[in-house]
Amino acid sequence: MTSPGIKPLARVDMVYISIETAIALASVLGNVLVVLVVCLNRALRNTTFSFIVSLAVADIAVGVLVIPLAIVITLEFKTKFYTCLLLSCLLLIITQSSILSLQAIAIDRYLRVKIPTRYSIIVTQRRAYVAVCLCWILSFLSGLVPMTGWNNRAALKNVSSSEIVCEFTKVMSMDYMVYFNFFGWVVVPLTIMIILYVEIFRLIRQQLNRRAEATCDGDRYYRKELKLAKSLALVVFLFLLCWLPIHIMNCITFFCPQCHIPKHAMYVGIVMSHVNSALNPVVYAFRIKRFRLTLIQITRRYILCKPTEPTPCTTSVPGITEKGNVNL
């Protein structure tokens, strides 16, 4: 039995919904742990982790709102045009905030390397909070643009019924998705991120080479350089891997209307964009030693109900008083 106005689910739809549900659970769990660790460990409450928490909140919203809304839209239920459009815009707002948070982290990392002596003076906690708010404001403004008229309402003006089958591509204008959302709000941040990470790599390599020549201990510094290069390459690669497929398919749909994209291919693109939210805690948080040690202590104390063990880094939970920079 199915509810009125909702189509029976095909096998591919059931597989898609199952995968999306698993991604939502992983995203919420992983990013809640990110927020919990930062809240309990005072040593992690710096400007960098303000951006990481913002990213975690956006990724929690992906698991709590975006993925359920994407599943609901998959059901193709009947509703008012602007109701369907608003649901579609919410998907864009939250996913856009995640991208902008990634951009803020890249800028923060660059400033740490470019101006290490003046970083704490220029990048204050208050300015970090302002930057976080700006990311969310820009996300809302860019995501709600279709509600102002850049949508497919005109193409559906001859529909006799006051309700439509809610589909993302039916209400969302593809020229908005391609020219504004993709080229303006994905390609541009991605290009800036790549430039920043390349520059970070160059600056750190120069610094490590100078130190290696001064200390005659080149192997140790080059190993650190290689580790950093792999970490930065992983960040950029995962961003590309997760976000480009769905936008490329949107471009194909827009520039080649006669080209047919199979439903399962579109589902793969959507899933890949969502799985980025589950991967972000691993890439941006769990690779940090101090974060990892705090997470272990939280697990032992609050989940396994065991006493915490001393670690090389003083990260007692809660009530940590240690402060300082956390190397990313």
Image (spheres, rainbow, N blue to C red):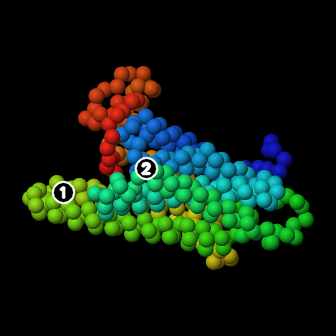
In the image, residue 207 lies at what x, y percent? Answer: 21, 63
Q: Residue at x 51, y 40 (%)?
A: 32
Give the residue number, with chain letter if any, for mark 1: 221
Q: Is residue 297 above or below residue 247?
A: above
105 or 191, nearer to the observer: 105
Q: Mark on residue 318?
A: none
Q: Secondary structure at mark 2?
A: helix
Q: Residue at x 36, y 22 (%)?
A: 307
Q: Is residue 86 above or below residue 316?
A: below
**Residue 205 appears in view:** yes
Q: Which quadrant would the N terminus be assigned to in this image? A: top right
Q: Residue at x 56, y 72 (%)?
A: 183
Q: CA distance from mark 1 to mark 2?
A: 31 Å
**Which of pointers 1 and 2 lies earlier in the amino acid sequence?**
2
Give the residue number, with chain letter if any, for mark 2: 125
Q: Secondary structure at mark 1?
A: helix
In the image, residue 124 lies at what x, y percent? Answer: 41, 52
278 or 41, nearer to the observer: 41
Amino acid on which the number 1 mark rests in the picture: Tyr
**Residue 272 appears in view:** no
Q: Is residue 301 left or right of residue 31?
A: left
* Residue density around tag 1, few if under 14, some if 14–19, many if 20 or more, within 10 Å: some
